[in-house]
Amino acid sequence: MKMMRAVVLDKITQAKDIVLSEYPVPEVRPGWVLVKVKAFGLNHSEKLLRLNEIRADHIRKPIIPGIECVGEIVDPSDSGLETGQKIIALMGGMGRSFNGSYVEYALLPARIVFPIESNLPWDVLGAVPETYFTAWGSLFECLHLTAEDTLLIRGATCALGYAAIQIAKALDCHVIATTHRAEKLPLISEADEAVLDDGKLTGKIHGVSKALDLIGPRYLKDTLTAVEKGGIVCQTGLLGGVYVLNGFDPIKDIPNGVYLTGFFSNYPTQQIVDDIFAFLNEKELVPAGGRVFDFANIRDAIAAQDEGKVNGKIVVKVPY
């Protein structure tokens, strides 16, 4: 039996306890493809899994975490993909319902594996799948962003925030980006306005037609009143640590003529993936990344995530 290295979890696991285990390379079956993982990004949802959600009955255990990766097809099975084809894969239960990407070889359902055309190196591509898919869906599917918009990105000093700034500026939008830490204002200097967020933006910013709220329920009511009449608010992130909004009254808390939506990134499609890479290629954008770690140093990568030491996407490069 061929073996590989993987992070395997069966209980709450702190960063210091992360180890690489020997694990069998999975056997291909119909409807699934075997991928040689080249790189993967770390995500907040994986941290939630590792430190809390792993206890839930709906999580298969033991589980290899990881909701995204980039790599090459090793065995396409009956998918119609080709051996050696460059792909990204994300979501659809990855790293929760079935084993994910913290591994050298991943067996993934063909429905979440998408061929791509890109000359970017693997460690740069590793910053794309979940982050840019979520940014793209939030900005275009939910906010219907256009060049004429003034876009507020609340909680912009995260990988998703940096990607959203990059995409919106490439579209020629006016971008207002916020952070709650004064020392992080330089990190969002690519925006037209970098604003220190004390929890109340209403009356302090003006002309906002679209808002991407990455803080979540903690400040959502204030975001709704900070946009202009006719504006759209998309709540995508949960950085504020509040996950539900108790006592929310849609009639009173959503101002007249303001629209509230949210983006759930569990349903990627080939068309959206194609649109993202066409945009990156056309605009000659290099995806915004934070720091790259080798797979052998996965414990250090996860520790850096937990401690908030990296500004931007943490990418783990798997030996080629």
Image (spheres, rainbow, N blue to C red):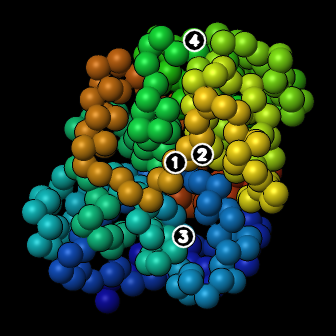
Q: Is residue 174 visible?
A: yes
> Would you call the spot at circle 4 few (<14 residues within 10 Å), some (14-19), or many (20 or more)?
many
**Quadrant in the picture for residue 161:** top right
For marks 1 and 4, the one nearer the N-term is 4
Q: Earlier in the sequence, mark 2 or mark 3?
A: 3
Q: Is residue 157 visible?
A: no
Asked if marks 1 and 4 touch (Cβ < 8 Å), the reply is: no
User: Mark 2 — residue?
Assistant: 236
Q: Quadrant of residue 93?
A: bottom left
Tell me which residue sits at (12%, 58%) in the image.
82
Type of the residue with mark 1: Phe
Q: Is residue 175 left or right of residue 142?
A: right
The label nearer to you, 1 versus 3, is: 1
* Neighbourhood count class around disc 3 (C-alpha, 10 Å): few under 14, some 14–19, many 20 upward: many
Choose the circle earlier in sequence order: 1 or 3: 3
Mark 2 secondary-structure assignment? loop
Label 1: state its secondary structure: loop
Tell me: residue 266, above or below residue 199: below
Task: State the residue in front, 263 or 248.
Answer: 248
Q: Position of residue 204 (x, y in %)?
A: 83, 16
Q: Quadrant of residue 128?
A: top left
| Along the viewing direction, whichever of 44 and 27 lies nearer the viewer | 44
Q: Position of residue 81 (x, y in %)?
A: 14, 59
Quadrant, the C terminus: bottom left
Q: Earlier in the sequence, mark 4 or mark 2?
A: 4
- Residue receiving disc 4: 174
What residue type is disc 2 on?
Answer: Thr
Horizontal arrangement in the rendering, residue 219 relative to residue 296 (left or right): right
Note whether 198 is above or below 74 in the view shown.
above
Q: Which residue is mark 3?
A: 65
Badge 1 vs badge 2, beta-carbon distance below 8 Å: yes
Label 1 crowd bin: few (<14), some (14–19), many (20+), radius 10 Å: some
